[in-house]
Image (cartoon, coloured by chain):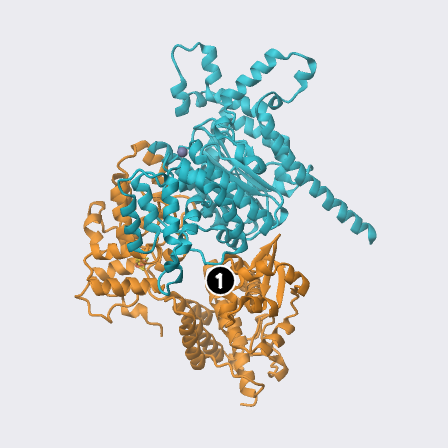
């Protein structure tokens, strides 16, 4: 557990540090790595992969397995199959290029790869989908990160004057990670998730999606499962891509409600009259608070977790009064929540002149226990890299698939295809269907990846349609002259 | 004084592109307003003596601004400080008298000189931009409504006014965003306020500060900004233009450096900007051993002793904590070798291999031995307080800023501070005087130091030095 948690934190740090360094100028270390890895790769030793196996895969190995079965479960081979047969290169290219013929959006875009050997390659860039495909198939990265669009091709970085190499555009991105919910989760902690806590991600998607659409007017928003314990959001409208860091920070602090570190028990403090955006959020939170927080999470059930809630109340006398009523009883969570509300909403507290208005506290508790928690560093800096959709998480082997925000209530992270299930599905489809038409079908259409790629294609179609309309509009304007 | 700008012959310089060597005398129409966006260079020649005097005067004003922000002065205190320093160094008289024109010319010229001095690096530019924005804002708020209008008209900025009909269609939403704005404008009834107020419709990107504070209505990408908040729009313009201009000046600078008379003055002006530099780590002494850190931790400010204790308790610190604490330790004299020993032992739960792979790079990086090889400086209080807010599971930050009142109180009692002082310190922190609270905490826990000897804590490493009886180097603290 500890191990797993630390590892994930590290990969975040790596991305951040790299971004920090890059913010100023060169990062020699990465450059060196890049060169060294080239040497390795040119020798093209498949042995390199054999010596390194994933912890998960290692536990799957069983000496009784036949060599064929062992092959099927070898993560290296599975990953290769994935990149050869399942990865949607074309749609992926159309997405990041925002058009079908290569332009600077794609050509000057940074990709970075983490290899199985832990080597981290930054500043890769490609001239088209084909080149990207070849490189991915050659490197077999365990992780792909997407960075900014620069003023020049990232792969030429070394030969350009640093002043002429600046990040200019990037999608507005958000990262919501379940570890940030640890202080309010009662079911799991760290990298683990279960059906009881996944609801937090569902609420997060709904709240953020509504704000991005209705307040900021963004239309092209892609939600992606991070492969393990969270979700990523890519806002792809042209306007979003062009935001400067200051505007990005402003959006983040507009969206941020839960604040404060380990030493602060009350993390939400909102004015009596809510901003319209938060009123809308509260309506969403209210639908989830009882089933998710009170029932599934049971935050009012055991003493340790309800004490945490009582600590939020900025009046120790009231805290003590409620604690006394609750201690040693086995009242239901719902009845304790009702009790707390009735107590705090009493007139005497609402009217009093000094101190906090206690009648607002239940509302703020709903916010603190349900409102999305964002990792702001990821969003506020245009340089920050974020893991690409359709990566495969090395620990869970699950594909980072898009999530349709309209049906995110039904999304189940445990039914997301893994490398193993995909390979099996493909095999059994091919065994059962041998017609010519089946042979011509894309491989992912034969598996459960189909619906997710469908979501992705729909999303990219929306972008391409808009690009086309813009071109037409421009053409008709230039005709007029 | 009828021709005050007549150049002294041998001191004249005229090779910079910013000063047209025309010897023009200021015409009154040059400065119709006290406010200036500094879009054009000043049309005058000026002597080297004036050049330096003007620059230093403006610098006094900018430094006062910085100081006041550092001390989290409340709005009215800030204004009082500004009134004082302005009357001493940069008067801005009203009307169209000759004196008023002189004031405005000096303002204009001095701004451009500092632009030259402060365009040389990203940091200097950011510093200058911050202080100049605050200065402009302060002056803008001093102007009458009419003067503001005259000024804005001269700038020729187009903001779309929201029609009465559109306004009424989103009345309820506008009202729930206007509670504070109305109160600040002295109007109790929000409905009245919204009805009578003129609203502008702008792209939300133009008013990041209002968005960040959630103090305007945003709908489908448009922000609806009340006239009262117009200052945000103006500041956005001011900032955008000045920041562009600074970069342009930076590009043009090499040419100006050729001027041998100008250069020393500019360098002198630029140097004024910092006092003793705790951020200077070019010579890490390396005097402190990893094993001595526990003993020395009694001299740590609260932010660092909190990190130290969390590290001992959890055998781990998240990234923000490692950065803040690691750089501080470097500042007190831990060499990179000792730092590696210290962190290796502290992260007792990790395997050697894991530590080597995942943390040692970071530590070496802090010492400028990896990556882009920058010798990172320990964070100042300002940086700790303002940037990178701690979130769940983080222990970095400043306890006076980031602890709840209850936790802060408990920590102070635990550190044997008496009840009256605890109340005093907690109150300071509550009023957002974080560094003063820290200074007070220092005084209370170091009764042997005479109060008054202790300047405001501005840097955790300064706290550490002072706690060990090293008084701040008085030479370095004064600026002539
Ligand atoms: S004021 Fe500075 S030194 Fe004092 S605790 Fe805060 S950050 Fe640390
Ligand atoms: Zn769970």
Residue at image coords 45%, 20%: A47
Q: How many marks?
A: 1
Residue nearer the viewer, B254 or A129: A129
Does residue B262 appear left or right of residue B379 in this picture?
right
Q: Quadrant of ligand 2?
A: top left
Q: Residue at x 45, y 23 (%)?
A: A49
Q: Position of residue B249 (x, y in %)?
A: 55, 64
Q: Residue at x 46, y 67 (%)?
A: B131
- Left or right, residue A155 beside residue A368: right
* Secondary structure category for the residue under label 1: helix
What chain is colored cyan?
Answer: A
Query: Which chain is depicted orange?
Result: B
Above or below A156: residue B478:
below
Can you see residue B369? no
Per the image, the residue denoted by label 1 is B125
Vertical arrangement, residue A395 with respect to residue B326, above or below: above
Q: Looking at this view, is B440 or A368 the one in front?
A: A368
Q: From where the camera sits, is residue A23 visible?
A: yes
Image x and y of residue B21, in percent: 60, 77
Q: Nearer the viewer, residue A452 or B272?
A: A452
Measured along the vertical axis of the image, is residue B107 above or below residue B300? below
Q: Quadrant of residue B410?
A: bottom left
Q: Which chain is indicated by disc 1?
A: B
Quadrant containing the C terminus of chain A in the rendered view: bottom right
Which residue of the protein is positioned furthest toward the left in this rendering?
B448
| Residue A201 on image: x %, y % | 48, 38
**Residue A224: percent from the left, percent from the top?**
53, 36
B40 shown above or below A452: below
Quadrant of residue B275 in the image? Answer: bottom left
Comparing A125 with A397, the one in front is A397
Dot 1: few (<14), some (14–19), or many (≥20) neighbours within 10 Å? Answer: many
């Amino acid at each position: 557990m500890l191990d797993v948690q630390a590892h994930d934190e590290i990969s975040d740090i790596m991305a951040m540090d790299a971004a920090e360094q890059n913010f100023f100028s060169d990062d020699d270390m990465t450059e060196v790595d890049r060169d060294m890895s080239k040497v390795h790769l040119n020798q093209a030793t498949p042995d390199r992969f054999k010596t390194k196996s994933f912890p998960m895969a290692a536990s799957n190995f069983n000496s009784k397995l036949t060599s064929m079965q062992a092959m099927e479960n070898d993560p290296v081979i599975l990953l290769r199959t994935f990149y050869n047969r399942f990865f949607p290169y074309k749609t992926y290219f159309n997405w990041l290029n925002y058009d079908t013929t290569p332009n600077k959006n794609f050509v000057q875009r940074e990709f970075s790869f983490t290899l199985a050997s832990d080597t981290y390659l930054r500043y890769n860039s490609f001239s088209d989908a084909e080149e990207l495909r070849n490189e991915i198939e050659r490197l077999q990265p365990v992780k792909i990160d997407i960075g900014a669009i620069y003023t020049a091709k990232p792969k030429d970085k070394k030969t350009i004057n640093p002043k002429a190499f600046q990040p200019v555009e990037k999608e507005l991105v958000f990262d919501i990670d379940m570890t940030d919910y640890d202080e309010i989760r009662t079911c799991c902690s760290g990298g683990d998730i279960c059906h009881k806590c996944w609801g937090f991600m569902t609420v997060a998607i709904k709240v953020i999606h509504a704000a991005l659409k209705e307040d900021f007017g963004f239309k092209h928003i892609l939600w992606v499962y991070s492969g393990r314990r969270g979700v990523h959001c890519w806002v792809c409208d042209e306007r979003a891509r062009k935001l400067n860091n200051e505007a990005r920070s402003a959006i983040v602090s507009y969206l941020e409600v839960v604040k404060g570190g380990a030493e602060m028990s009350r993390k939400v403090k909102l004015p009596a009259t809510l901003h319209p955006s938060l009123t809308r959020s509260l309506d969403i939170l209210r639908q989830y608070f009882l089933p998710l927080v009170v029932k599934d999470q049971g935050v009012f059930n055991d003493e340790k977790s309800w004490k945490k809630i009582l600590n939020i109340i900025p009046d120790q006398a009231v805290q003590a009064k409620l604690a006394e009523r609750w201690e040693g009883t086995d009242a239901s969570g719902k009845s304790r929540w009702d009790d707390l509300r009735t107590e705090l909403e009493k007139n005497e507290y609402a009217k009093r002149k000094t101190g906090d208005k206690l009648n607002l506290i239940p509302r703020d508790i709903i916010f603190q226990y349900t409102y999305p928690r964002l990792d702001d560093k990821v969003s506020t800096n245009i340089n920050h890299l974020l893991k690409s959709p359709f990566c495969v998480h090395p620990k869970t082997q699950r594909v980072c698939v898009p999530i349709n925000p309209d049906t995110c209530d039904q999304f189940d992270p445990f039914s997301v295809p893994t490398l193993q299930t995909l390979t099996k599905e493909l095999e059994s489809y091919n065994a059962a269907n041998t017609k010519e038409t089946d042979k011509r079908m894309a491989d992912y259409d034969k598996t459960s990846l189909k619906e997710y790629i469908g979501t992705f294609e729909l999303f990219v179609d929306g972008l391409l349609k808009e690009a086309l309309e813009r071109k037409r509009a421009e053409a008709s304007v230039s005709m007029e002259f | 004084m009828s021709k005050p700008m007549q150049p002294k012959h041998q001191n004249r310089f005229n090779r910079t592109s910013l000063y047209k060597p025309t010897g023009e005398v200021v015409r009154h129409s040059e400065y119709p307003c006290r406010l200036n966006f500094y879009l054009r260079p000043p049309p005058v020649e000026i002597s080297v003596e004036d050049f330096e005097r003007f620059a230093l005067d403006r610098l006094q004003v900018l430094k006062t601004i910085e100081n006041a922000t550092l001390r989290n002065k409340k709005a009215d205190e800030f204004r009082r400080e500004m009134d004082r320093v302005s009357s001493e160094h940069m008067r801005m008289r009203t009307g169209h008298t000759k004196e008023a024109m002189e004031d405005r010319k000096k303002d204009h010229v001095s701004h451009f000189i500092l632009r030259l001095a402060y365009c040389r690096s990203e940091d200097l530019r950011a510093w200058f931009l911050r202080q100049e924005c605050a200065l402009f804002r302060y002056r803008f708020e001093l102007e009458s409504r009419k003067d503001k209008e005259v000024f804005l008209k001269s700038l020729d900025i187009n903001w779309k006014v929201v029609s009465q009909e559109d306004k009424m269609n989103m009345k309820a939403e506008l009202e729930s965003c206007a509670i504070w704005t109305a109160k600040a404008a002295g109007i109790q009834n929000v409905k009245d306020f919204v009805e009578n107020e003129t609203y502008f419709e702008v792209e939300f990107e133009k008013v990041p500060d209002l968005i960040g504070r959630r103090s305007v209505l945003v709908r489908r990408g448009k922000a609806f900004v009340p006239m009262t908040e117009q200052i945000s729009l103006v500041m956005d313009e001011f900032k955008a233009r000045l920041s562009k201009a600074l970069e342009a000046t930076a590009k043009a600078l090499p040419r100006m450096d050729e001027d041998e008379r100008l250069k020393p003055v500019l360098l002198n002006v630029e140097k004024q900007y910092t006092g003793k530099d705790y951020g200077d780590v070019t010579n890490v002494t390396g005097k402190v051993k990893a094993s001595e850190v526990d003993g020395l931790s009694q001299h740590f400010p609260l932010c660092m002793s909190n990190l130290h204790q969390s590290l001992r308790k959890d055998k781990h610190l998240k990234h923000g904590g490692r950065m803040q604490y690691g750089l501080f330790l470097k500042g007190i004299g831990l060499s990179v070798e000792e730092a590696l020993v210290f962190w290796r032992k502290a992260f007792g739960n990790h395997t050697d291999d894991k530590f080597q792979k995942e943390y040692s790079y970071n530590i070496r990086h802090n010492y400028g031995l990896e990556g882009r090889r920058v010798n990172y400086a320990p964070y100042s209080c300002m940086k700790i307080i303002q940037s990178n807010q701690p979130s769940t599971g983080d222990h970095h930050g400043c306890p006076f800023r980031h602890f709840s009142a209850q936790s802060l109180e408990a920590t102070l009692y635990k550190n044997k501070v008496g009840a009256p002082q605890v109340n005093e310190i907690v109150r300071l922190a509550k009023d957002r005087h974080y560094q003063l609270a820290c200074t007070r905490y220092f005084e209370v826990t170091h009764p042997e130091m005479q109060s008054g000897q202790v300047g405001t804590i501005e840097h955790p490493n300064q706290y550490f030095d002072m706690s060990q009886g090293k008084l701040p180097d008085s030479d370095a603290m004064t600026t002539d």
